[in-house]
Image (cartoon, rainbow, N blue to C red):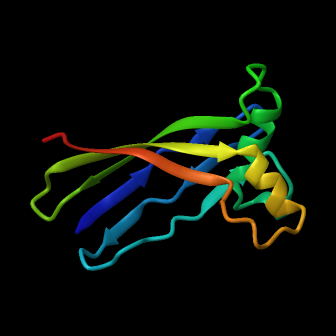
Amino acid sequence: MAHNAMLEGLAGNSGEAHFEEVQLIPSKQSATEIMPVVTGYGEFEEHDVTTLLREEESLNQNGIPEVVRMMKINYRDAAQHKFETTFELVYHRVDDEMMRAGHGDWPAAPLQIRNVRLARLS
């Protein structure tokens, strides 16, 4: 069970993504969706972090068609111990372009989470 789960926001060149705090995530719940609020773009991108990362990737000069951002979630357990989960949020440009072009059968999603690490802070 997690209390007061807070996902750190993302800042881009033309906008930001913020996430609301989740008061309680029950222990038997396999997933909780936290919708971002993206500012600096139009209303159609209000909940889409791929727009933020897509723009950052277009400015990328190293030739690698992906953007990797470190993310962090802080939360407490029922005994009030503090925990932190860190992970890499990876945006894949090619997968995004294929999905946006209407290839609904494309096997890969444009966003991936990898290198998840859990740590007890107190």
In percent of the image, x 56 and y 52: which residue is there?
112
Q: Residue furthest bottom?
A: 28
Position in image of residue 16 (x %, y %): 68, 42
Position in image of residue 11 (x %, y %): 64, 36
Left or right: 49 in relation to 116: right
In the displayed structure, would residue 5 be above or below residue 68? Answer: below
Q: Residue furthest left?
A: 79
Q: Residue furthest right?
A: 101
**Which image quarter: residue 68?**
top right
**Which image quarter: residue 65?**
top right
In percent of the image, x 42 and y 43: which residue is there?
87
Pick whichever, 70 or 95, lies toward us: 95
Left or right: 108 in relation to 105: left
In the displayed structure, would residue 77 be above or below residue 18? Answer: below
Pick whichever, 76 or 70, lies toward us: 70
Position in image of residue 103 (x %, y %): 84, 68
Position in image of residue 98 (x %, y %): 82, 58
In percent of the image, x 35 and y 75: which residue is there?
30
Quadrant housing the C terminus:
top left
Residue 21 visible? The answer is yes
In percent of the image, x 56 and y 36: which residue is there?
69
